[in-house]
Amino acid sequence: MNTLKRAFSIWHPFTQHALHPIMTPVASAEGAYLITRDQRRILDAISSWWVVTHGHCHPRIVAAIQKQAAELHQIIFAGHTHEPAEHLAQKMLTLTGLDHCFFSDSGSTSVEVALKMALGYWRHSGESRSQIIVMEGSYHGDTIGAMSVGERGVFNEVYEPLLFSVTMIPFPFSGKEEETFRALEEACRTGAAAFIVEPLVLGSGGMLMYSPRVLAQMHAICRSHGVLFIADEVMTGWGRTGTLFACEQAGITPDIGCYGKGLTGGALPLALTVCCHKIFAAHYALDRRRMFFHSSSYTANPIACAAALENMRIWEEEPVHERITKVIKLQAQALERFRDHKHFQNVRQIGTITALDLCVPDSGYLASSALTLYDFFQSHNLLLRPLGNTLYVLPPYCVTEEDLCKVYEAIEKAPQACGLL
Ligand code: PLP
């Protein structure tokens, strides 16, 4: 018992310590690389859980953090405001076409805020709508509300008694989109409050991709029934799908958008839930019971806001779109050799993200191949973290052709080298 206590004083996220007892000690990071205590350079091919956009420790973001920390590092955000938050909110409203920004500190909390905004909207508008429609295979975070609106399965089955019930519609697999539309239409007709969805790609659900046309059609169905449309852009935002936000490709503006991860370029925890005016207006009254009852101690932390603001300036002033276009092209070229490959199937890409499924009998998040592959990639100084038998590459935008060559050579070798065939 004492040995266990001593060995695992830190309990790591999404980690089974009994199978994976040794953590990689990272001392620093630069660009697309993590540098370990013993000076190994590990290529971060998943942008450290999809947060890092331009690269680790972008000098402009580092400098903005240092400057802000020396001026104002934290204040209560009820009854107070500060410039970094104000400037950031203005930029975000311009980018999203929405009207009001609410700050929080993680993707999960941005989703909690979105759900509470939706419920508050209906309650204060005098309609008793509370049902939330969700898509099979979704992942929206690990807090109770975020888990409730996600796929029910291995991630949350232990906590099932705490989760609220939702209406689940099928994922729009190619050729089966009509089933999704019919189920959404039916769910909307019952007077649901909101539909929450990851636009264009379901991340943790296995990098499942669907078309902008389907996204636009789902949005139109919600519109026609007055059901609020919540776009969870926590993973898809900040260029991952090729455009700044995935919703742009469908030509839609959600009623509520959730943004996190790359909001600060991946430097600090910050999230935004941005909504249209009618939602704010429904809460605006002389009655204090109608205020929005949500906060956390670090709401709109000035240092995190300064990092996010600098990130936005980088988008404005550096050739970020050109870098993204290059990554998209390199990724597409690298994928070619896996099309019709006997060991891989469902080879797919959206923007800068690629994914492919290893042909093994065992599939799903707990597929035994995942850990073996993870260790194999680590031994090749690559950070890749398969979702079960699904391998995906989601690099920061500073990744080079040479870096990607290393990644895909390792992926091609992996099934045989790991004895998985
Ligand atoms: N929503 C989506 C689509 C995500 O992919 C994630 C995390 O991966 C979250 C929400 C939760 O974000 P966080 O881990 O910052 O709480």
Image (cartoon, helix red, strand yellow):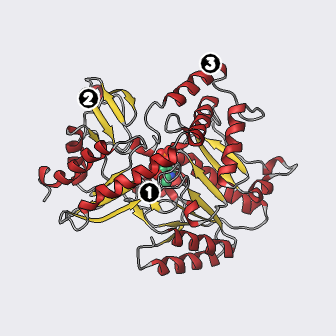
Q: Which residue is mark 3?
A: 70
Q: Is residue 115 visible?
A: no
- Of marks 3 and 1, which one's residue comes earlier in the chain? 3
Q: Which residue is mark 1?
A: 351
Establish whether ligand 1 lies closer than 8 Å to the Cβ of label 3. no
The residue type indicated by label 3 comes to Ala
Residue 194, x across and y down, in percent: 63, 65
The residue type indicated by label 2 comes to Arg
Q: Categorize mark 3 by other alpha carbons within 10 Å: few (<14), some (14-19), many (20+).
A: few
Residue 184 is left or right of residue 299, and the answer is left
Q: Categorize mark 2 by other alpha carbons within 10 Å: few (<14), some (14-19), many (20+).
A: some
Asked which secondary structure carries label 3, the reply is helix
- Alpha carbons under labels 3 and 2: distance apart: 33 Å
Q: Is residue 57 visible?
A: yes
The residue type indicated by label 1 comes to Gly
- Residue 48 lies in quadrant: top left
Q: Depth check: 109 or 258 in front?
A: 258
* Residue at 53 percent of width and 47 percent of height: 107
Which of label 2 and label 1 is nearer to you? Answer: 1
